[in-house]
Image (cartoon, rainbow, N blue to C red):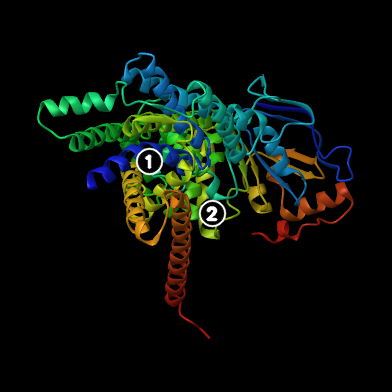
Amino acid sequence: MLKLEGLSKVFYPGTVNENIAINTINLKVGSGDFITVIGSNGAGKSTLFNLISGTLSASTGKIQLAGQDVTRQAEFRRARQIGRIFQSPLLGTAGNMALEDNMVISLKKGFKSLRISLNEKRRAEFRTQLEALGMGLEHRLKDNVGLFSGGQRQALTLLMMVLSKPDLVLLDEHTAALDPKNAQLVMDLTRTYIERYQLTTIMITHNMNHAIAYGNRLLMMDKGQIIYDVDGQEKLDLSVEKLVEKFHAIRNKALENDEMLLSD
Amino acid sequence: MIEGILVEGLLYGIMVLGVFITFRVLDFPDLTVDGSFPLGAVIFAALVSSGVAPILAIVVAFVGGILAGFVTAAIHNYLKVPNLLAGILTMTMLGSINNRILGNKANVSLIRQPSLLKDVSAWFESVGITQDLAYLVFFVLAVFAIKIALDVFFRTDLGLTLGAMGNNVQMVVSTGVNPATLKFVGLGLSNGLVAIAGALAAQYQGFADVNLGQGIIIAGLASVMIGEFVLKSNKIFLLTLRVLVGSILFRALMYLARLIGFDIGLLPTDQKLITGITIIILLLVTTVKNEKSKTKAALAAVSKVPNDA
């Protein structure tokens, strides 16, 4: 589904501020894979997502998505195949617009015509889909999304993303800004949707337990490289202690980021 | 007098609808307006003077305005010029273009030329309605037709996506739409409306002037803000309505300023100063109001939690 070949991103090349954010990454993601990504701050996780989704252009290397070379493709074009959710719940929805209006514009990806898609049939569909979130949003179709809580907005973003049927899902610490209860709720929803629709997913998380518990493959990043790539039985046997040990063995140093260990 | 205020409010209301689209919906402060308003007027004057039917001349003015908006969008999108500067560039260039369209004359009288307003008032006169009232009826119908067309547009998929632009560009990108394309759509539509207002203003005043647009953007912005002051809503039907209400109130305010101003020695040229001060006062009051409501909400939130200390 996704293939990265010799992918690098260098910020400010040739200056004193030169910074190799992504260092020659090769990665093959199979259809239906659910990959979790961990790594300390500055490891390059978000930069990797920015490269895949086209927010940043690659310095070197190639990106293939669903068999097509998209390395030079604009972000909005790539977005037609990619469903990306950010840490901030504000980025997935337009707060000054009604819930139903938000849903209708994200339903179908690509340029919008002068058609009026929102009708009673659509509204009924939306209500059924929203009911499944269990948040009572099905009664609030006409309310502005800005009135909703962070958890409600992120769950809604997730639903809208799934309805747009993307080839690849990128989750960038999408529960990190939520309180523990809502974070768990959104994580449960995430798992349900990924399993039900067999979504090819890459999920960045600061939470080592989540990284171990979710998905069929785990990547550990450090200094712009993938330093540990594990799947199958070995992934199932992982524990937080083993991961920390692994990092120490590979990098010959302790994990710098306490946040990774402290988050539950 | 009251008819005059209403007619002017509605006429300029078409321009204010355009300003509302860029400033509020797109969050793109577009200064092209100061050039596209007189553009509409001079296109109308030039075409009518050479024998083109008034209604067709208004359509051409609309297209001219759209093109002016496209130029600003292109400068901003392709050369990565900040939105304010892009608008100023187009506005400045339009200054020269408007002069050329008018045949290098500062203004052209339309008194002896056919116009849509003359046709309308002639028709109304034949059924026994005076000119003042005829203008009012015509502008109510015409402006509300435009308003309703806009309301429908903002219910379409394209219109809704445009609505998301000013709030969350990332979301627009995520739905696979190029924000640059939407800026073309929004700026084109906005300046098209502004040019129609310019063409109608030329007919209403009986002449087209290349300096007609000076400071029009500030008048438009003041109208938008007055409207927001009197009505709060998230429904597009009410949002466009309050733009028109704002425009009428602004004209009433200007009329009042002229009325009182005459006694205290204000000149017609002071009008821009008054407009500017109006905006500053509105900004001030809005800021104070927001602060107060925030403090109130914070107090309410704190009082709900039992204090352990």
* Residue A234: % across, % down: 73, 42
Question: Which element type, helix, strand or loop, lies under badge 1?
Answer: helix
- State the residue in front, A142 or A178: A142
* Residue at left offset 70%, top offset 40%: A233
Establish whether labels 1 and 2 are both on one chain.
yes
Residue at far bottom of view: B309
* Residue at left offset 81%, top offset 49%: A246
Residue at far left of view: B128
* Residue A72: % across, % down: 70, 24
* Residue at left offset 52%, top offset 23%: B104
Label 1 environment density (alpha carbons within 10 Å; few <14, some 14–19, many ≥20): many
Label 2 environment density (alpha carbons within 10 Å; few <14, some 14–19, many ≥20): some
Question: Which element type, helix, strand or loop, lies under badge 2?
Answer: helix
Sequence order check: which comes first, mark 1 or mark 2?
A: 1
- Check whether the beta carbons of the residues at disc 1 and disc 2 lie within 8 A of each other: no
- Would you say A207 lies left or right of A117 here? right
Compute the Cα span from label 1 to label 2. Answer: 25 Å
Report if residue B166 is visible in the image: yes
The disc placed on residue A184 is 2
* Residue at left offset 61%, top offset 42%: A171
Q: Which residue is mark 1?
A: A100
